[in-house]
């Protein structure tokens, strides 16, 4: 019944009444917008507030999705003052009280995004329209994140992105209502390059295999720029179709190409398949130009490392976060997650958890759920204690600026979770960049009149 | 309208009523929210159109998602280049997908049976792979084609219309979000249904059915069947384009995934599940699958626990454990089981089930047993 | 340049062997039973998971919880001791090392039972049903199978290491008297190629040289006449379905070191294997093998940078493009018979 009621709200009636008044694209909405400045999409009126979790529960990234869901459930418990409190007390500065958000108990609804942009949008729409979600969060691909944050901009609902690594999410496709805690391909390149120079020298010749879609292209470009600045030469960049299962035809041309480093700009299943196959083709046993041939995977996660098995040993990459860090925030979160689920959290779980807490904290600081105020509270927010060191939610592009972890496949893992070692933390000053380089426009903060 | 037989008229009226009152009768099922209702309409149109080809001629296309996707892309490009108004976008989308279907149909219809299916599948997969990678300048690849404030919109700017905020498609200036979007799509579904009904009953429809029953005999009687099958192919391609355009209207984003072979397979499943060759069946199949996808997949342990709350303690958690395998992320398992069961026991789809039940209550001698031939989905 | 082309040719042969092996079972089922089996990919997947199960059993560990030590995530530390090595010593280590080839011993009976059960339980009832219904029911079964696997093994890929002796590469160039280290190829892929060749050869020999095979071939040509001669052709066809399942399963097992199996790999191979079968001609065994190698080799060469420079994106569509061209030039595929699946 509530749905019907919402269907015939004042705004709807007004809109219908105005049908056909103006034959052009202008709606009179713009004149009357100020009239309901405090009436916005899914203003929580009861004693609960609902998060919309948009997670890939089936499809290629189902494992990331399942891990994110665990983290969100944990975050909701902690926000409501249940469980061991997790990072609630460690966030600095913090306005969180452990009694829900603004005194309202936090609830959540979930939707299976199937790692598809279309489905993710449909799910987000459902959670906003039907379930009254005040905020949408989650996802494990950039396509999803960009599609959903576009929708959230239309609806006037804040989107706290989960795992998304493309430069575009906070670059050319950035949105006022979208926020990303995760790092991006540019930062991977800048964070990884110095270490590569240190380990492999400055006169390397690199061969790129790149997943043939926008994320792959941005990462290829970022890594290429960063390594060429180091003095490396790029022999060739080859695009591979997304979802390739057999990479043999892309791997054999590398053998005698004169390259001595292979850079795999792959993610998820692509990487799980391409990395072991590269090793099987003997690339890492080879010598080229008088040096040992090396393989680099700029973005790697625990879940991918697990899937790639032994092939990942000794391979360098970057991560947003790792449970083996030794700061109090990481220790507390790993303990809290481990106690609840019996395994250490992945970086997807961590970013999901932190995003949920940051949103809640911003609402507390704003003193209202009204999105423009929450956005203001998040923009330029400087915080610490969440496991990434001091972090800035940059106002210009809604990108978190924080340390980037350089990791390396563990040569002698002590458990099935112990697959990556932290080699270095690249300080955030080194990976910060001018937000203008990727273009894009955040758009307005005023909620659009579409949320019915 | 005047020449319409009484039964058809009744069916049409009943269908119209059922569609328009959906927000009311679907409310108890948790499905009466605009986005899902819009999807019910859109995929209903898609399935009705698919049935014009498959149900009538028996040609099983595995590539209809390509036309759906092309319709979406065309509509979004119209929003970007011409105007935010939906009317030019829909016209443009139908024309483009019709032309696309003409080309693919012309080539694919040179073969029949599974060879035709593989040809359509090959074309659709080529479109999908290209859209995802090489054609990114046109399709925006992985990220999908979205509207931005800086789009040129030549027609709108000629009329000096300006957009404030995130641009969204409109109908004569009125936004199509929420329930107005649903009624807009519902109108098209009703028109699409009406046209399909007329086509089925027309001499053209008879010809198509003749092709399905025995193409060789049609040849021998001197008919050149190709123009008819091609016409059916193009019409169903235009239906798919219309559905794709409507999806872009209600949600202005066009992504390549909607062209993948699994999406083509989905419309095949919808049609057969509901009952190929029947008018209402494909629509019901579409609704059922979308309902599963959206509602079943969203049921999590918490909801289940509330549902089984009335049971004694140990039993209810056991029930939750069992049931959770079939809902939430396990919804696909339920879908697979439903298919297997329906195909085994109700080969004519849900419509055959309905007919059988009706037959139980109505044992009038005039319909002796199987006189009403069950729709034979062709091969 | 020669080395690149030669290597791509090897890739093509290797890929082609894999395609042919998968397509073989599919076309066998179609040729004998006349059933379009969309669950064939799922059979491939089930075979791959036989390897996973065998490895899981062989690497079973006793877990003792040490309450005095804590893992970094706060749960009591688990001390693991592998069982098989503890019991069988060196032989156990060899077993674990060769777990993938050994799993074939499990796969054959398992897939035979699965195949026969599937045929007797469900597919039998669909012989006289339209192909569309066969597609739907087998597709439904494929979904059920993969979802069950997912709920047991989780959605992630599970890496299956290859035996240590078969890791690394073989220097084929040196064998042929060329410079060493230029043309090298992974040993396991050569093993896979040989394995595929042996299996394909065995299936052909079985059909060609045994009485059973002769009857089956006769049944493929004219089922009714064979039935009239008093031969129980149905039972033989059932066994052929089981055989097709075994071939698919073995292909899956041996592919696991190349492609870490997950619940979804069956679907990934389904479309491809259908294209191979149709290009070769529905129901034609030589056609499936020829088409497999043709598509494998063309796909390898289409991925070369020089080719992609001429036709951008060709590696994305080559398989489908070849399928379209062949079907337009040769209406029934390479070796198809007239009147099959053209209704």
Image: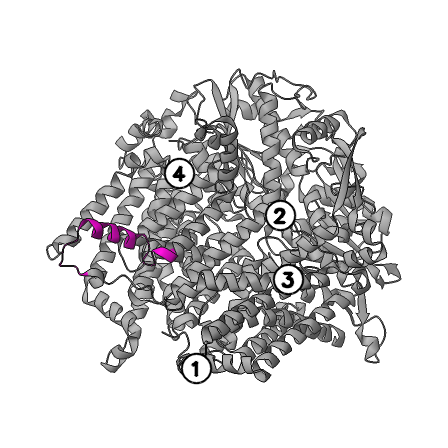
The residue nearer to you, when weighing C125 against B145, is C125
Q: Mark 1 — residue?
A: C226
Residue drawn 55% across the image and 67% down it: C242
Query: CB atoms at circles 2 and 3 under 8 Å apart?
Result: no
| Residue behind mark 4 | B162
Q: Earlier in the sequence, mark 2 or mark 3?
A: 3
Which sits earlier in the primary sequence, circle 1 or circle 3?
3
Q: Nearer the viewer, mark 4 or mark 1?
A: 1
The boundaries of the magenta stretch are B343-368
Rendering coords of residue C76 (x, y %): 76, 31
Mark 3 or 4: the one toward you: 3
Query: Residue furthest toward the front?
Result: C230
- The reply, left or right, for residue A31 in relation to residue A134 is left
Task: Identify residue for label 3.
Answer: C107
Q: Earlier in the sequence, mark 1 or mark 2?
A: 2
Q: Is residue B160 visible to us here?
A: no
Q: Position of residue A151 (x, y in %)?
A: 47, 38
Residue A254, percent from left and from top: 75, 64
Q: Secondary structure at mark 4?
A: loop
The answer to whether residue B200 is above or below residue B305 is: below
* SS at circle 1: helix
């Amino acid at each position: 019944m509530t749905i019907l009621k919402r269907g015939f709200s004042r705004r709807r009636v007004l809109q219908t009444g105005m049908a056909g008044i103006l034959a052009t694209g202008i709606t009179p909405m713009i004149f009357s917008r100020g009239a309901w400045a405090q009436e916005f999409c899914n203003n929580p009126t009861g004693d609960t507030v609902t998060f919309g979790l948009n997670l890939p529960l089936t499809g290629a990234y189902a494992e990331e999705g399942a891990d994110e869901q665990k983290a969100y459930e944990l975050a909701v418990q902690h926000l409501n003052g249940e469980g061991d409190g997790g990072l609630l007390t460690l966030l600095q500065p913090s306005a969180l009280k452990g009694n829900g958000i603004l005194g309202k108990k936090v609830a959540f609804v979930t939707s299976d995004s199937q790692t598809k942009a279309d489905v993710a949008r449909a799910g987000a729409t459902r959670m906003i329209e039907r379930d009254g979600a005040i905020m949408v969060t989650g996802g494990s691909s950039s396509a999803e994140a960009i599609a959903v944050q576009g929708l959230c901009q239309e609806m006037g609902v804040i989107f706290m992105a989960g795992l998304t690594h493309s430069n575009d999410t906070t670059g050319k496709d950035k949105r006022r209502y979208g926020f990303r805690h995760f790092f991006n391909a540019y930062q991977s390149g800048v964070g990884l390059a110095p270490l590569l120079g240190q380990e492999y020298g400055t006169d390397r010749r690199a061969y790129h295999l790149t997943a043939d879609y926008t994320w792959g292209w941005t990462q290829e470009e970022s890594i290429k720029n960063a390594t060429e600045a180091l003095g490396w030469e790029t022999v060739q960049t080859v695009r591979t179709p997304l979802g390739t299962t057999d990479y043999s035809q892309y791997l054999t041309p590398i053998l005698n190409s004169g390259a001595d480093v292979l850079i795999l700009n792959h993610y998820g299943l692509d990487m799980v398949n391409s990395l072991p196959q590269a090793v099987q083709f003997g690339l890492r046993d080879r010598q080229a130009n008088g040096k040992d041939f090396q393989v680099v995977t700029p973005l790697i996660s625990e879940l991918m490392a697990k899937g790639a098995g032994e092939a990942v040993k000794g391979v360098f990459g970057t991560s947003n976060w790792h449970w083996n860090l030794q700061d109090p925030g990481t220790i507390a979160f790993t303990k809290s997650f481990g106690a609840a689920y019996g395994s250490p959290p992945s970086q997807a779980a961590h970013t999901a958890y932190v995003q949920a807490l940051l949103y809640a904290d911003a609402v507390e600081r704003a003193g209202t759920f009204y999105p423009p105020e929450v956005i203001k509270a998040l923009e330029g927010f400087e915080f610490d204690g969440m496991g990434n060191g001091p972090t800035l939610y940059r106002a210009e592009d809604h990108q978190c600026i924080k340390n980037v972890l350089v990791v390396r496949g563990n040569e002698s893992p002590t458990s099935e979770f112990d697959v990556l070692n932290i080699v270095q933390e690249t300080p955030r000053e080194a990976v910060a960049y001018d937000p203008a380089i990727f273009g894009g426009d955040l758009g307005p903060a005023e909620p659009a009149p579409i949320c019915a | 309208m005047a020449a319409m037989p009484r039964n058809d008229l009744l069916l049409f009226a009943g269908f119209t009523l059922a569609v328009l009152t959906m927000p009311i009768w679907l409310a108890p099922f948790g499905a009466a929210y605009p986005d899902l209702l819009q999807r019910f309409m859109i995929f209903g149109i898609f399935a009705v159109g698919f049935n014009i080809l498959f149900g009538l001629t028996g040609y099983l296309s595995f590539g209809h998602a390509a036309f759906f996707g092309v319709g979406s892309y065309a509509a979004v490009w119209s929003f970007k280049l011409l105007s935010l108004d939906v009317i030019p976008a829909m016209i443009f989308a139908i024309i483009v997908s019709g032309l696309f279907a003409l080309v693919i149909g012309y080539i694919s219809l040179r073969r029949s049976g599974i060879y035709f299916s593989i040809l359509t599948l090959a074309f659709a997969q080529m479109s999908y792979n290209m859209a995802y990678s090489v054609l990114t300048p046109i399709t925006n690849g992985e990220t999908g084609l979205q509207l931005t404030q800086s789009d040129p919109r030549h027609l709108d700017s000629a009329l000096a219309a300006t957009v404030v905020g995130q641009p969204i498609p409109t109908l004569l200036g009125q936004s199509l979000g929420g329930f107005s979007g649903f009624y807009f799509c519902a109108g098209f579904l009703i028109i699409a249904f009406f046209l399909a009904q007329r086509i089925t009953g027309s001499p053209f429809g008879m010809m198509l059915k003749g092709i399905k029953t025995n193409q060789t005999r049609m040849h021998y009687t001197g008919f050149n069947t190709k123009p008819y099958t091609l016409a059916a192919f193009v019409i169903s391609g235009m239906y798919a384009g219309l559905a794709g355009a409507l999806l872009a209207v209600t949600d202005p984003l066009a992504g390549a995934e909607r062209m993948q072979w699994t999406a083509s397979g989905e419309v095949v499943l919808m049609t057969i599940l509901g009952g190929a060759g029947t008018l209402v069946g494909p629509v019901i199949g579409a609704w059922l699958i979308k309902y599963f996808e959206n509602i079943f997949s969203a049921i999590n342990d918490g909801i289940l626990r509330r549902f089984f709350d009335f049971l004694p303690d140990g039993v209810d958690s056991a029930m939750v454990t069992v049931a959770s395998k079939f809902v939430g992320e396990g919804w696909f398992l339920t879908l697979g089981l439903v298919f297997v069961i329906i195909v085994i026991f109700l080969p004519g789809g849900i419509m055959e089930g309905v007919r059988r039940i009706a037959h139980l209550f109505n044992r009038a001698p005039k319909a002796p047993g199987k006189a009403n031939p069950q729709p034979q989905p062709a091969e | 340049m020669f080395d690149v082309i030669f290597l791509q040719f090897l890739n093509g042969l290797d890929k082609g062997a894999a395609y042919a092996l998968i397509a073989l079972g599919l076309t066998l089922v179609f040729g004998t039973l006349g059933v379009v089996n969309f669950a064939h990919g799922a059979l491939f997947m089930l075979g791959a998971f036989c390897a996973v199960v065998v490895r899981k059993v062989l690497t079973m560990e006793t877990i003792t919880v040490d309450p005095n030590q804590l893992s970094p995530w706060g749960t009591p530390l688990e001390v693991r001791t592998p069982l098989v090595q503890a019991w069988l010593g060196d032989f156990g280590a060899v077993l674990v090392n060769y777990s993938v080839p050994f799993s074939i011993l499990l796969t054959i009976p398992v897939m035979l039972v699965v195949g026969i059960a599937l045929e007797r339980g469900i597919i039998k009832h669909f012989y006289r049903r339209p192909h569309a219904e066969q597609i739907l029911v087998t597709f439904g079964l494929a979904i059920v199978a993969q979802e069950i696997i997912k709920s047991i093994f989780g959605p992630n890929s599970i890496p299956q290491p290859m035996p240590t002796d078969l890791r690394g590469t073989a220097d084929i160039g040196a064998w042929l008297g060329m410079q060493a280290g230029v043309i090298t190829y992974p040993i396991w892929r050569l093993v896979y190629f040989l394995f595929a060749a042996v299996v394909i050869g065995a299936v052909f020999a079985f059909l060609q040289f045994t009485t059973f095979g002769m009857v089956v071939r006769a049944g493929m040509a004219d089922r009714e006449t064979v039935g009239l001669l008093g031969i129980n052709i149905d039972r033989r066809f059932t066994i052929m379905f089981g055989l097709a399942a075994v071939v698919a399963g073995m292909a899956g097992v041996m592919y696991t070191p190349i492609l870490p199996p997950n619940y979804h790999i069956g679907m990934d191979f389904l479309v491809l294997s259908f294209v191979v079968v149709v290009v070769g001609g529905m129901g034609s065994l030589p056609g499936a093998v020829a088409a497999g190698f043709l598509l494998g080799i063309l796909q390898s060469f289409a991925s070369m940078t020089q080719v992609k420079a001429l036709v951008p994106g060709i590696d994305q569509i080559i398989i489908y493009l070849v399928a379209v061209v062949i079907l337009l030039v040769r209406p029934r595929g390479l070796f198809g018979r007239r009147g099959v699946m053209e209704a």
